[in-house]
Image (cartoon, helix red, strand yellow):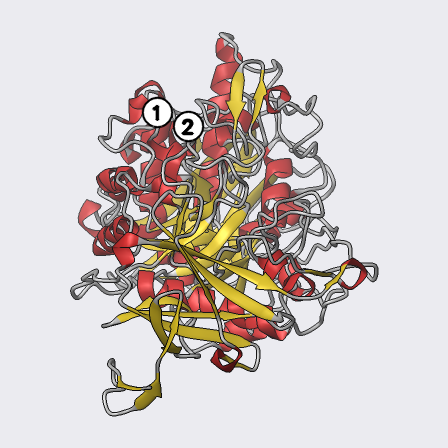
Amino acid sequence: MKYNLINGMKEQLVPVDEISGYKVRPGFYLINGATAMENGVNFTIHSYNATSCELLLFHRKEVKPYAVLKFPETYRIGNTFSMFVFGLDIKEFEYAYRIDGPYDKKKGLIFNKNALLLDPYAKAVTGQSQWGKKHNESKSAYRARVVSDTFDWDEVKQPDIKFQDLIIYELHVRGFTYDKSSKVKHKGTFAGVMEMIPYLKELGVNAVELMPIFEFDEMEDIRVIDGNMLYNYWGYNTVCFFAPNTGYTSAIEYNREGHELKTLIKALKENGIEVILDVVFNHTAEGDERGPFFSFKGIDNNIYYILTPDGHYYNFSGCGNSLNCNHPIVHQFILDCLRHWVIDYRIDGFRFDLATIMGRNEDGSPMSNPPLLESLAFDPILGRVKLIAEAWDAGGLYQVGSFPSWNRWAEWNGKYRDDIRCFLKGDGGMAAAAINRITGSKDMYTPERRGDNASVNFITCHDGFTLYDLYAYNVKHNEKNGWNNTDGDNGNNSWNCGIEGETTDKTVLSLRNRLRKNAFAVLMCSRGAAMFLAGDEFCNTQFGNNNAYCQDNITSWLDWSRLDEYKEMHEFCRYMIAFRKAHDVIRRTTQPAACGFPDISIHNNSPWNSSFSYDSRVIGVMFSGKNKDTDCDDIVYLSINAYWEKQNVTLPDLPDGMTWKIVMNTDIEHSSEEHYNFYTERYGNTVVIQPRTVVIAVSQSVAGPEKRLDNDIKLTNES
């Protein structure tokens, strides 16, 4: 039988068959997944080792399929099965596959012809539409929906913010607004985040990094500990890589492709805020031999996963399995996925969880030039997005400073976090390391090899203590996770200031507040992109839990009532973000200063003296260059006293007609610049810096306020 088809194929005569009462024809083999077309739906799936494949159609929420369509052998080209099914209405069905093939466990071949398999290219997943509720208790409940993409992006543009200018705000979509204190209408959803855009804009951040938003199952391995339900809350266990998590939408979207998420992304871009996704290509939710069997295991287990010679799973992720990222098929899958998110969702960047696994060979060994990482670095579709690696994994591979980059890949700078934490709490022998981190980690990222586009500086992130907890706890308190406090990192480089946990001791509270401000000020005055954890700006706490991956409660939710309680910290953070934006010399090398000062210079208590010993706990970093707006010299001096006694620090002499103005002193309650300048003890160029305090000075003309170099700093943060 011949038939005139559609969608650009109008004149082409194609054979039409009938299977299970449906008219079908060979599909479009280069179109992955399930795609709605004019007269039906195109289904395409790949399996290297399969002997046969079936398409199963289900009525919504039904357990048994109402139709089973086996792919004829003639509908297979190479290792690709493709079939066009006429007359399907995408609103009326869900689908899955069954694939048969050889079973030889030692070779990693574990085909099961009875298992329902989720399409890896599915754009929407059913079975988990509402957070915390599963409509089908079967572990094979994951099925896919076909979606239509009718979203109108209008003329929205990528903000295309330069890497050094990034101020990244890491947040969890649910935890950001789920607590009633957020006062949003759509708590814990993409829509809830959108309601908070005015807050983000006022704070001054220009990028949000969303913890995993690919479809994951929060119900996986749910447990009850001390009467509390524990979930897979963070979402680092991907079920489907092409679909947004349906539990994060305020309304069930069914057959629209991520409409609420796209609306959020569009609104963020319209407000000058980039969107970076935290993505997990190091493992999947299928786990090891004990884990569920719902997708890759049944499609090509020995291709998608790194297996031992006897067919077991290598576990470099700590989550049961490791994706075989540099196998050509998996490599192509990951590239297809990232292109999808950039094209269909206009994503600006990706942070790759445990990214060193993406550089491992099929035997698990590290590769010097991993094909996948190189491909992503040079892919034209990804050409302007940020690629950020978490350059370590649970298998012990640590590549901070040496992650393969091709001058494209940046890194979460774990050494910045560790060295700055150690120096700020007063550890000995850390002065030189702290200077390296503040000035761009050029000992790790040379200008020739990596430049100023490699380091994402951070002191806190989702994984570890919040900034408040960093100076309230000496040790982790993860008992509520149910593992007898054995989970989570033991090396936190934290300090409780003398009392563990909450206290009413005013001396301790004052010191903790100063240390928090020290950390944030140093972060905002460091070369490289800056990132901090949502809620740090108003002292959110996790009560000492440094691994709150399973806590879907106030432990992980932001408590927005603390915004009023810690208003001074919030205003301080807003100011420091604005300060960073106003001084290009902090973020990058500008035109040389007319006064002849170098771009960056290092000092101790004395100007131009850069010698340090094990006991050195006072450092000064001076940034100099031209202010692009005034064409005048812009000079910023960051002085850190990590010692427990006050120190006299002499600032360098400025050229005639210029003087130093103190614009930040963490020992003084945050107020105006004039307040800092007036109350900071000072004798000419010598400043008395109180114990464990950060002071920032800027150059200004003695001619009057109309020529001040810092008069662009305002707490609007809308630049």
Q: Are marks 1 and 2 in contact (CB under 8 Å)?
A: yes
Q: Determine the secondary structure under disc 2.
A: loop
Q: Nearer the viewer, residue 96 or 534?
A: 96
Give the side of residue 116 with respect to residue 151, left or right: right
- Type of amino acid at the residue the image marks with label 2: Trp
Could you tell which of marks 1 and 2 lies nearer the N-terminus?
A: 1
- Mark yes or no: residue 248 visible: yes
Q: Nearer the viewer, residue 637 or 191?
A: 191
Write the residue at 25% across / 42% down. 194
Give the side of residue 138 with respect to residue 110, left or right: left
Image coordinates of residue 538 in percent, x first then y, are 38, 28
Write the residue at 73% across / 55% down. 397
Q: Which mark is residue 179?
A: 1
Image coordinates of residue 484 in percent, x first then y, are 70, 21
Q: Which residue is mark 2?
A: 557
Asked if 649 appears above or below 261 in the picture, the reply is above
Residue furthest toward the top? Answer: 504
- Type of amino acid at the residue the image marks with label 1: Asp
Asked if 539 appears above or below 593 in the picture, the reply is above
- Mark yes or no: residue 373 visible: no
Asked if 667 appears above or below 582 in the picture, the reply is above
